[in-house]
Amino acid sequence: MDLYQQARRYPWQLSETSPAIRYRELLESGLSSDAIHWRAGRGQLVRAHQGLYLRGTEPTVLDRIHAALLVAPAHATIGFHTAAMLYGFGVLPSASVHLLVPAGTTFPQRSGIVAHQVLVPLGDPIAVLGLPCAAPARCAVDLARISNRREALTVLDAALFSLACTAEDLAAEVSRHRRLRGIRQVRELLPLADGRAECRQETHLRLLLRDGGVRGLTPQVGVSDEHGRIRYRIDLADEANRVGVEYDGSSHIDRDRMYADRVRHNWLVSQGWTMHYFTATDLYQAPERVVEVVRAAQARRSRPYPHAR
């Protein structure tokens, strides 16, 4: 399954083990201080934050989020990486719980929690799995602002793929962040964002080619057989010149997958397509070569063939 699809399905796989309980509530239940420490030492209780415990051996993602909200200031809202995960575009994982708090709010540093002070008003939070989250477009723009350029486009693509927000939602959010750090990057990338992309490397490949001046490539183009049925999809395709570009990941090493890939490649070639495949090594260690190969392929296919004599 492709990365963006995994991210979209992930929220529905989440579960929680038990509600958080405060230290004073444990004392009120009849446990002594020594008994609490004894249970914590043996994994029956997990200390989530100072004065706050979770029952069980290993807190789940939802347990940690609930615990963070309990020790956060009133009206704290989930944002950035954590909200993106809950919305289904958590393609930039973070071990911390990310919360949004009003500017000027005092929030002591706590392990496992990152508090972001908000300058642009949030509006009413949206309940996701019962948790208060900033709007999905806000989360996507915030996360794209603080990420490097490749990962910023990754977030925007994944947000659109998840259907959590639309391009219009993102554009409206960008206009509200005019003076914030990193917003210029998001504004420049937004016209390139495409919800048809299916994985991070495909997004990176598309951005690399775009920056290299290669035009005419469309994500996830379906190629139909003689009956009009889509038989295969190409990661990036120049339909006018029938040039296909694909990211070749580690999943293609399997013997059965290699056989299926060869059948697929041979069929596409028989339909007049010129196919080029690139690995992570090509993409991240020899990017200039990737651009040169695709540009040359487009140039060859766009030239008219000389008439036979």
Image: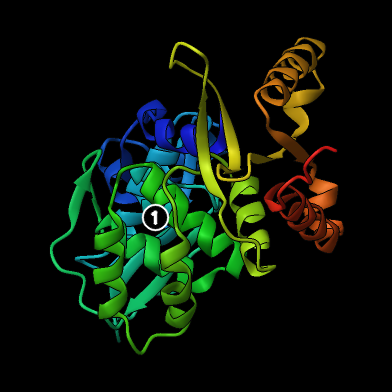
Q: Residue 37's spot in the image, x, y percent?
A: 51, 42
Categorize mark 1 by other alpha carbons within 10 Å: few (<14), some (14-19), many (20+). few
Residue 227 falls in which quadrant of the image? top left
Q: Is residue 234 left or right of residue 190?
A: right
Mark 1 — residue? 51
Q: Give the vertical position of 53 relative to 266 (above or below).
A: below
**Quadrant where the image shows the C terminus:** top right
> Going 21% across and 70% down the picture, which residue do you hit?
122
* Residue 109 in view: no
**Quadrant where the image shows the N terminus:** top right
Q: Nearer the viewer, residue 237 or 171?
A: 237
Amino acid marked by disc 1: Gly
Q: Is residue 252 left or right of residue 198?
A: right
Element at badge 1?
loop
Q: Residue 230's spot in the image, x, y percent?
A: 47, 20
Q: Give the vertical position of 298 relative to 56 (above or below).
A: below
> Going 77% across and 42% down the picture, which residue do you hit?
307
Q: Is residue 162 left or right of residue 304?
A: left
Q: Residue 232's spot in the image, x, y percent?
A: 56, 22
> Going 36% across and 53% down the picture, which residue do you hit?
83
* Residue 226 in view: yes
Residue 262 falls in which quadrant of the image? top right
- Outermost residue to the bottom: 179
Number of numbered discs overlaid on the protein picture: 1
Q: Nearer the viewer, residue 9 or 51?
A: 9
Q: Which colour assignment does the render follow?
A: rainbow
- Outermost residue to the left: 124
Q: Residue 193's spot in the image, x, y percent?
A: 45, 58
